Image (spheres, grey):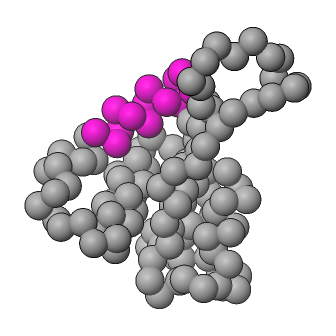
Amino acid sequence: MREDVTITVGTLDRVAALADAMRSMWLDNGVSPGSIIPDYRDEVRRFVERGAREDGLVFFLAEDGDAVVGAACCQRFAGLYPAILTPDVRRYGYLWGVYVGPDYRRAGLGRRLTERC
């Protein structure tokens, strides 16, 4: 495990790093660059701002020095039906955009990001 990599809570001024990690994730999964909208950073910013305001969205960045080498995001899920149970009984949420750069894979960083979420 690469202990020199730190995981920090993302802030709105770092949303571009999350967006870039998401873009890299899709490219690594075979999506062509032309299939990603040109203003993907703006779209991610709007999504994160709304999610943080309404759904408890939080994201984390994995950093090796000044380089962002991974990211993960999580938030509450609004659900497919009315949530009539109290939060101590059941809470729904999901993780999305868990990404680790190729040079940092297979070292537990994805697990560390997921655990932070």
Residue at 64% of width from left, 62% of height from top?
113
Can you give x and y, in whole percent of width and height, for residue 95 in the image? Answer: 58, 49
Q: Please state which of residues 5 and 80 is positioned toward the viewer in this rendering.
A: 80
Q: How many marks?
A: 0
Q: Quadrant of residue 67?
A: bottom left
| Residue 47 percent location from the top left of the image | 39, 34
Main secondary structure type of the part rendered in magenta: helix
Quarter of the image with the N terminus in it: bottom right
Looking at the picture, tell me which residue is in the foreground, 25 or 59.
Answer: 25
Q: In the rendered view, would you say 54 is above or below 26?
A: above
Residue at (11% x, 61% y) in the render: 34
Q: Nearer the viewer, residue 66 or 44?
A: 44
**Quadrant of res 4:** bottom right
Q: Residue furthest front?
A: 81
Asked if residue 33 lies left or right of residue 1, the reply is: left
**Per the image, is 47 magenta?**
yes
Is residue 43 visible in this depiction of the protein? yes
- Taking the magenta stretch, the answer to whether it contains residue 106 is no
Q: Residue 24's spot in the image, x, y percent?
A: 33, 67
For residue 48, side relative to residue 84 (left or right): left
Using the image, determine if residue 51 lies above or below residue 3.
above
Q: Does residue 24 appear anywhere in the picture?
A: no
The magenta stretch spans which residues?
A: 43-55
* Side of 47 relative to 40 (left or right): right
45 on left or right of 51: left
Q: Residue at x 61, y 43 (%)?
A: 94
Q: Residue at x 56, y 24 (%)?
A: 80
Q: Position of residue 108 (x, y in %)?
A: 67, 78
Residue ranking furthest to the right: 88
- Towards the viewer: 79 or 112: 79
**65 over 62 or under it: above or below:** below
